[in-house]
Amino acid sequence: MKVGIADTTFARYDMARTAIRELKAGASIQIARYTVPGVKDLPVAAKKLIEEEDCNIVMAMGMPGAAEIDKMCAHEASSGLIMAQLMTNAHIIEVFVHEDEAPDERSLAYLAEQRTVEHARNVLDLLFRPERLTQRAGTGQRQGYEDAGPIESSGSSGEVR
Amino acid sequence: MKVGIADTTFARYDMARTAIRELKAGASIQIARYTVPGVKDLPVAAKKLIEEEDCNIVMAMGMPGAAEIDKMCAHEASSGLIMAQLMTNAHIIEVFVHEDEAPDERSLAYLAEQRTVEHARNVLDLLFRPERLTQRAGTGQRQGYEDAGPIESSGSSGEVR
Amino acid sequence: MKVGIADTTFARYDMARTAIRELKAGASIQIARYTVPGVKDLPVAAKKLIEEEDCNIVMAMGMPGAAEIDKMCAHEASSGLIMAQLMTNAHIIEVFVHEDEAPDERSLAYLAEQRTVEHARNVLDLLFRPERLTQRAGTGQRQGYEDAGPIESSGSSGEVR
Amino acid sequence: MKVGIADTTFARYDMARTAIRELKAGASIQIARYTVPGVKDLPVAAKKLIEEEDCNIVMAMGMPGAAEIDKMCAHEASSGLIMAQLMTNAHIIEVFVHEDEAPDERSLAYLAEQRTVEHARNVLDLLFRPERLTQRAGTGQRQGYEDAGPIESSGSSGEVR
Amino acid sequence: MKVGIADTTFARYDMARTAIRELKAGASIQIARYTVPGVKDLPVAAKKLIEEEDCNIVMAMGMPGAAEIDKMCAHEASSGLIMAQLMTNAHIIEVFVHEDEAPDERSLAYLAEQRTVEHARNVLDLLFRPERLTQRAGTGQRQGYEDAGPIESSGSSGEVR
C-alpha cells in the first residue's frame, strides 16, 4: 500500500511530518510526498499522486487563513479535492485546519497535530480495517476536537407515514 | 437489487442502521455499507459503491454541524454527490440532517430517524415502483417533517400570452 | 420527438401535469415522466431521461423552499442540471418556482402554472421553430411574470475606442 | 472562421444584433446564432455551437436581473460557460450586463451596446491577431466602461526573498 | 521545459513581463504567452497552453476588481483553473492580485510584482527542484507579503484517543 501526502508551503505547521510518523507507526506502507505552494494547488497534486505515483489514498493537508478570501480558496480547494476523488475513485482525506479555529498559535499547532494524527488513523482504517469505521458510524467523531458523541432518539421509530 | 449505504463517523446518529432495517423490511435486497469519516468523503464512497460494488442506488447519510464551515462542507459534499450521480447515471439519495434543524439532541435524533425511514421508502419506490413517486408528484412531501401538502391555483390556466 | 419531464414529490403543485397538457396541445410528441423526491435528484433523472429514454429535451420542474438551506439546494440542483446538459449536449429547461416568489399559496400555484406553460412553449420552440426564440431575443421575456420588455439605447453605438 | 452567437429572450437589449454587425464589419466570418430562454441555457447552447455547428469561438450574451436569485443564476451560468470551454478547448466570451450596472434603462442599453462592441473586437483579436491582446496585457481594459489604465510600481522589483 | 503564461488585458499591471523575466533568469526554458480579456477566460487559455502548446506548467495571472461581482468572477475563474488542472494533470499556478489588497495603486503594483516573482520561483521549484518546496512545507510562506512563518505546538503529540 502507498499513501500520498500532499501539503503546502503556506501552512504554518508541518502536518505532513506528523502524518508520516503516524502512518509509519501504524502499518508498513510506502509514502510519496508532494509539496505545493497553497491549498488550491492540492487537487492536482493529489490526483497526480494517485495516477502517476500509484498511491492508493492521499492525505491533503492545508492551513487556510482567516480572511474571507482564504475561506473562498479553501472552498475551491475542497471542491477540487472532491472532484479529484470522483475522477480517480480513490479517497483523498482532506486535513484542513483554519487559522481562526484556535485562539492562539500554540493551540492552532496543537489542533493541526491532533487532527492530522486522527485522520492518519482514519486513512489506515480505510486501507486495512474499514469495519472499524463502521463500528464508529454515527458516534459523533471529531478530528482534533473532543468527540461530540452519539445522540439518542426519544421517539418510537418507523411510525411516520 | 443492491443498495449502497454510505455514512460517516462524524454523524451523531446511526442513520445507516435505520436505513438498512427499513430497506430489508420493504424488499429482498442486498446491502453494501461503506463508512467514511465525514460528509466530504461521501461522494467518492458512493461512486465506489456504484462502480466497484455494483450497487443500483446509494443512500448517502450525514449530519453536518451548525457552524458556517460545516454548512460549506455540506454544500461541497452535496455538489459532489450530484456530480457522482451524473458520472454513474445512478441515484444517490442524500439524507443529510443539519445539527441546527432541531432544538435539542433527542429531537435531532428523532428527525434523523424519520428522515432516514422516509428516504429508504423513496429508494424502494425508485427501484421497484417508480409510479408511486409520480402519484405523489407535486404534493409537498417532506422527509422527517410533516408534509407541506399540495396547493391549488385560483387562476384560469393556460391563458398567458 | 420525445420530451422528458422530471419532477419532484417535494413540490406543492403538479407542474408536470400542466407541462404535459401544454406540450401535447402544441405538437405531436412522446412524453417520458420521471418523478424523484427533491430538486437535488433532478440532474441525474434528467440525464437518464436523455441517455436511457432517448429524450431530445427535458423539462426539470421543482419548487424549492424559502429557507437558506433550500436556496442552497436549488443552487446545487441548478449547477447539476447545467452539468448534465454539458455532458449530453441536450437542453434541460429548468422550471423552478421558489416558495417565496409569491405572497400566498394560490398566487404561488398560479405562478407555477404560468411559468410551466410558458416554458413548455419555449421547449416546443427549441424543438420545432428555434427562429421564434431568435425573433424574441433581447425583448425581456419573463416566464410566469409580465414581460419586462426591451430597452433602447440613447447613445450612438459603435463609437467606443 | 465561424463565430457562434448565443443569446437569450430574457435580455432586454438585442446584444446579438450589435455583435453580428461589429463582427461582420471587422472580418469575413460566418455567424451561427442560437437563442435560448435565459442565461442558464447558454452553456449547452454555446457547446452545441462549437461541437455541432463547428464554431471556432462563441459569444454568450445575457442580461441577468438585479435580484439575489438572478445573481445566483448568473453565477451558475458563468460556471457552466467555463466548464463548456474546458470540455471543448474553445473560447466562449461571456458578455453579461447586469440590470443593476446602470442607473436607468437607456444607460443600461448603452452599456450593453458598448460592452458587446468591445467584446466583439476581443473575439476578432483572439481569432485573427492575438498579439494585439498581448500588447494590451496588464493595461486595465474595461468593456463598456472607461478603461482603468495601467498602474506602476514604486518598489524595486525582484528583491523579495 | 516549457512554461505557459496566461494573462489578461483587464489587469492593470503587466505581471507576465515580470514572470517571464524571472523564469528566464532562473532556468533555460521556453515560454508561450497567451493573453485573454479577463480572468474568466484564463481556464481554457491555460488548458490550451498545456494541451495545444505542450506547456509543462502554466502561470495564470489576473487582477480581479474590488466589487462583489469581481469577487464572484475570481471565484469562477479559480474553480475553472482547478478543473483545468484536474483535466490535464498539470499545474496551473494562479497568480491573482485583488484590487483591494493594497491601499493605493503603487502598493498594488508592487504587490503584483512581488507575488509574481515569488510564484515564478515556485514554478521553477515545481519543475526542477520539488524538494525545495518540501523543505519549506508548513513554514507559512506568503507570496508578495512577508511570510507568516511556522508555529509550534505546546502539546505532547500523538496522545489523542
Image: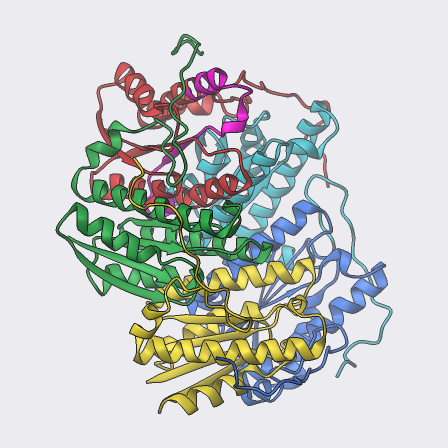
Chain colours: A green, B red, C cyan, D blue, E yellow
Residue E7 x %, y %: 54, 78
Up/down of D158 relative to C9, above or below? below
Can you see residue A134?
yes
| B154 is within the stretch colored magenta | no
Seen from the viewer's position, the closer of residues C90 and A146 is: A146
**Going 58% across and 40% down the picture, which residue do you hit?**
C95
Up/down of E96 relative to A19, above or below? below
Residue E87 falls in which quadrant of the image? bottom left
Residue A99 x %, y %: 50, 52
In screen coordinates, is D114 left or right of E119?
right
Quadrant assignment for the N terminus of chain B: top left
Magenta span: B83-112
Can you see residue D45?
no
**Going 72% across and 31% down the picture, which residue do you hit?**
C102
Seen from the viewer's position, the closer of residues B58 and E86 is: E86
Q: How many dots with numbers?
A: 0
Farthest left residue?
A28
Residue D107 x %, y %: 83, 65
In screen coordinates, is B7 left or right of D75?
left
Residue C137 falls in which quadrant of the image? bottom right
**Going 55% across and 59% down the picture, which residue do you hit?**
E75
Residue C60 x %, y %: 51, 40
Quadrant assignment for the C terminus of chain B: top right
In screen coordinates, is B95 left or right of C134?
left
**Going 44% across and 11% down the picture, which residue do you hit?**
A160
Up/down of C33 relative to A27, above or below? above
